[in-house]
Image (cartoon, rainbow, N blue to C red):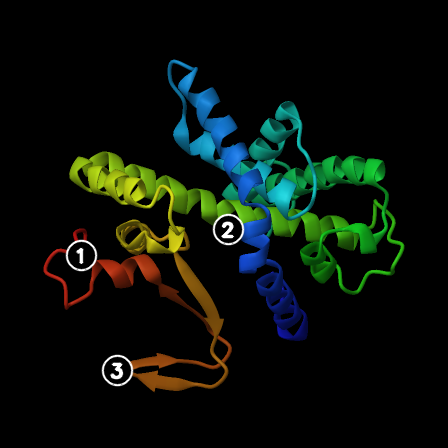
């Protein structure tokens, strides 16, 4: 959602923040949060795993990236609003009731209202916020108002980026494992072999995750603007046109694979 120098700065700061040290520091917190959710799932007769995973990663993003503890009812409301926001990302540019853009902006406005109320309780000192959020609000003054639009936009954007594609990827992994019991059993054996060892030794699990993301990538494609007119393989692409590289289409039409849906 950003470009140029701002995009580069945010990317650098984000990669610094999500370092091995960060993961080691918060490992126990990650494990406890996931365990709490899984125990609750197991206590219920049935769960909508996709919605539950979205709730899990929304809470994880809030807790470990924005330093916000979300009550369960607030988490549920945020989950609904982000779904409404996501469903209307691609919509006609008509900001009138009943149209997608209006619904998406309305959801974003309510999200910012929720986060503003939370930030009011925490105070607005940017220096006390997690470094990754400081990077997203790098142009804010040291003492930011909790209702500052740039700060709230940063929180909404960061939370959306941190939970949307990750939850889709996690759901894809679960989906494919349930359809491949032999693979699931090998994953369990891989985990058991490393129970008291280094997680980096989980080679089979690493391959399973990558294969699930190859078959069902959470991001459908990447948009780019044509900077100069070109002709490529018989197709003319005029300057300033927007083109998209479709990851799913690419993965499903790889000429080197006889069956793209299988390893």
- The residue under label 1 is 260
What's the residue at 24%, 40% (across, down)? 189
Whichever of labels 3 and 2 marks the residue nearer the N terminus, that label is 2
What's the residue at 59%, 66% (across, down)? 11
Q: Are marks 3 and 1 in contact (CB under 8 Å)?
A: no
- The residue under label 3 is 233
- The residue under label 2 is 90
Q: Are marks 1 and 2 in contact (CB under 8 Å)?
A: no
184 or 100, which lies in front?
184
Q: Are marks 3 and 2 in contact (CB under 8 Å)?
A: no
The image shows residue 263, relative to residue 12, as above or below, that is above
Neighbourhood count class around disc 3 (C-alpha, 10 Å): few under 14, some 14–19, many 20 upward? few
What's the residue at 64%, 41% (across, down)? 62
Quarter of the N terminus within the rendering: bottom right
Neighbourhood count class around disc 1 (C-alpha, 10 Å): few under 14, some 14–19, many 20 upward? some
Q: Is residue 120 left or right of residue 110?
A: right
Quarter of the C terminus within the rendering: bottom left
Whichever of labels 3 and 1 marks the residue nearer the N terminus, that label is 3
């Amino acid at each position: 959602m950003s470009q140029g120098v701002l995009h580069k700065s945010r990317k650098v700061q984000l990669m610094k923040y999500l370092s091995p040290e960060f993961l080691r520091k918060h490992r126990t917190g990650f494990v406890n949060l996931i365990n709490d959710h899984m125990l609750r799932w197991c206590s219920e007769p049935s769960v909508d795993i996709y919605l539950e995973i979205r709730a899990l990663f929304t809470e994880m993003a809030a807790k470990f990236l924005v330093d916000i503890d979300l009550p369960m009812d607030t988490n549920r409301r945020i989950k609904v609003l982000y779904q409404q926001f996501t469903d209307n990302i691609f919509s006609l540019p008509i900001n009138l009731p009943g149209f997608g853009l209006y619904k998406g902006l309305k959801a974003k406005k309510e999200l910012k209202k929720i986060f503003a109320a939370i930030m009011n309780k925490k105070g607005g000192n940017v220096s006390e916020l997690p470094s990754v959020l400081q990077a997203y609000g790098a142009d804010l003054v040291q003492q930011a108002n909790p209702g500052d639009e740039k700060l709230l936009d940063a929180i909404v954007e960061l939370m959306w980026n941190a939970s949307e594609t990750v939850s889709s990827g996690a759901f894809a992994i679960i989906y494919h494992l349930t359809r491949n019991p032999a693979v699931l059993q090998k994953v369990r054996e891989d985990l058991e072999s490393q129970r008291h060892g280094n997680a980096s030794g989980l080679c089979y699990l690493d391959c399973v995750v990558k294969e699930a993301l190859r078959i069902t990538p959470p991001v459908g494609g990447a948009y780019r603007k044509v900077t100069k007119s070109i002709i490529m393989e018989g197709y003319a692409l005029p300057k300033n046109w927007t083109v998209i590289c479709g990851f799913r289409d690419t993965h499903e039409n790889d000429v080197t694979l006889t069956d793209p849906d299988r390893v």
